[in-house]
Image (cartoon, rainbow, N blue to C red):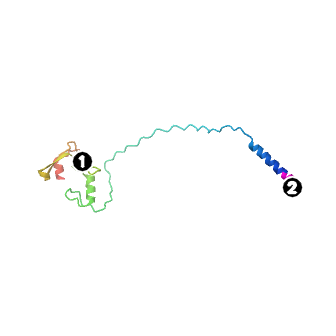
Amino acid sequence: MNRLARRALILGLTALVSICACRKVAVAPVTAPEPPPSPAAPPPIPPKTIAPEEGGEGTFALEEPFTGLSATNLATSSDRILRGLAFRGLTRLDPSGKVEPELAVSWEALRGGAEWVFHLRPDTRFANGRYVEARHVVSS
């Protein structure tokens, strides 16, 4: 092919491509396909309620040696933690540090705070079913 023929071929192809590119083409709008229907979600399963079982053992890691559960001798933080797990007190502290009733429903200070009277909840029982009386609290 000579030079002139090659140029004519290139010019003709360029013109053809330009004409085809300028032509309007009708394009149908594309729509997204419909998603398949999702299966119905199964109903939620309620959580199981687990009741504590009687008996058994508990293991605790303590920072300090345990010295005993005597209310008059809570020498270490370990003593206080274990006593709190084993016994209920007359009062307790709520999360904000405010004193609230536990075994006592109310209390009053006498003689300028030198003596205190605690009024016990009448429905409090030991694990064996016996009612808690004032003498039990005083002795503990």
Write down the quadrant of residue 129 in the picture: top left
Residue 39, position as x, y percentages in the image = 53, 38
Helix, strand or loop for disc 1: strand
Q: Magenta includes 4? A: yes
Q: Is residue 82 among the parts visible in the rendering? A: yes
Q: Is residue 88 among the parts visible in the rendering? A: no
Q: Nearer the viewer, residue 36 or 73?
A: 36
Label annotation for residue 100? 1
The disc, 2 or 1, on the residue closer to the chain's N-terminal end is: 2
Mark 2 lies on residue: 3
Question: What type is the residue that disc 1 sits on?
Answer: Glu
Mark 2 vs mark 1: in front? 2
Examine the residues drawn in magenta and state their main secondary structure.
helix
Residue segment shown in magenta:
3-7
Query: For the image shown, how many numbered marks are present on the structure?
Result: 2
Helix, strand or loop for disc 2: helix
Above or below — where is 136 with respect to 66? above
Residue 7, position as x, y percentages in the image = 84, 52
Which quarter of the image is occupied by the N terminus? bottom right
Task: Judge left or right: residue 115 versus residue 18.
Answer: left
Q: Circle 2: is it few (<14), some (14-19), or many (20+) Cα within 10 Å?
A: few
Residue drawn at 87 percent across, 52 percent down: 5
Residue 114, position as x, y percentages in the image = 13, 53
Question: What type is the residue that disc 2 sits on?
Answer: Arg
Label annotation for residue 5? none
